Image: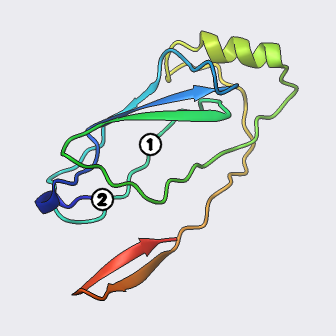
Amino acid sequence: NNMVTREIQVFSSAFVYLSLDGERYQEKPVKFSPRVDRPRDSVVNLTVPLHNRIGKFVKVSMIFSARWILLSEVTFDSAVVLGNVTEELLEQYYFNQQDSDQSSRPQTGGETTHARKEVTPATSPTSNTQAYIGL
């Protein structure tokens, strides 16, 4: 969300680290810098492409572009990895992956799981302006 007048803006960049066990994370994160034309007081929807990276755990580090960052409705699109993948093969692929543009990736299924997104109008007892709550 952007509320420039209250020093709230979208992050300037994010680094996404993935892990199989929650203890060891990939050395090279997915790097993302959102393109925001001009900061204004409005809701901004962002999608961070993970380039088919594989992981059970996610760690996100965000760089502030203002004093505050306001996040809501974080969801992930995921797909099942097809084939007989052993732990050894997965770890080899996972920890030898040099960057997000690597061409040899495990094949994924066509089905994607999407989280349901709803936005509900809310009113404030102290203000006549309308706000929105993500559910």
Q: Classify 10 Å Cα crowding around label 1: few (below 14), some (14-19), many (20 and above).
A: some
| As drawn, 95 above or below 12 | above
- Residue annotated with mark 1: 48
Q: Which mark is residue 1?
A: 2
33 and 83: which one is in front? 33
Per the model, the C-alpha gap separating discs 1 and 2 is: 15 Å
Q: Secondary structure at mark 2?
A: loop
**Quarter residue 121 falls in:** bottom left
Residue type indicated by callout 1: Val
Q: Which residue is situated farthest in the front direction here?
A: 126
Which part of the image, by quadrant, shows the N terminus? bottom left
| As drawn, 9 above or below 100 | below
Q: Residue at x 14, y 58 (%)?
A: 4
Q: Secondary structure at mark 1?
A: loop
Residue type indicated by callout 2: Asn
Q: In x, y percent, where is residue 11?
A: 29, 43
Disc on the earlier residue, 1 or 2: 2
Q: In x, y percent, where is residue 97?
A: 58, 14
Q: Classify 10 Å Cα crowding around label 2: few (below 14), some (14-19), many (20 and above).
A: many
Q: In x, y percent, where is residue 19?
A: 62, 26
**Quarter residue 129 falls in:** bottom left
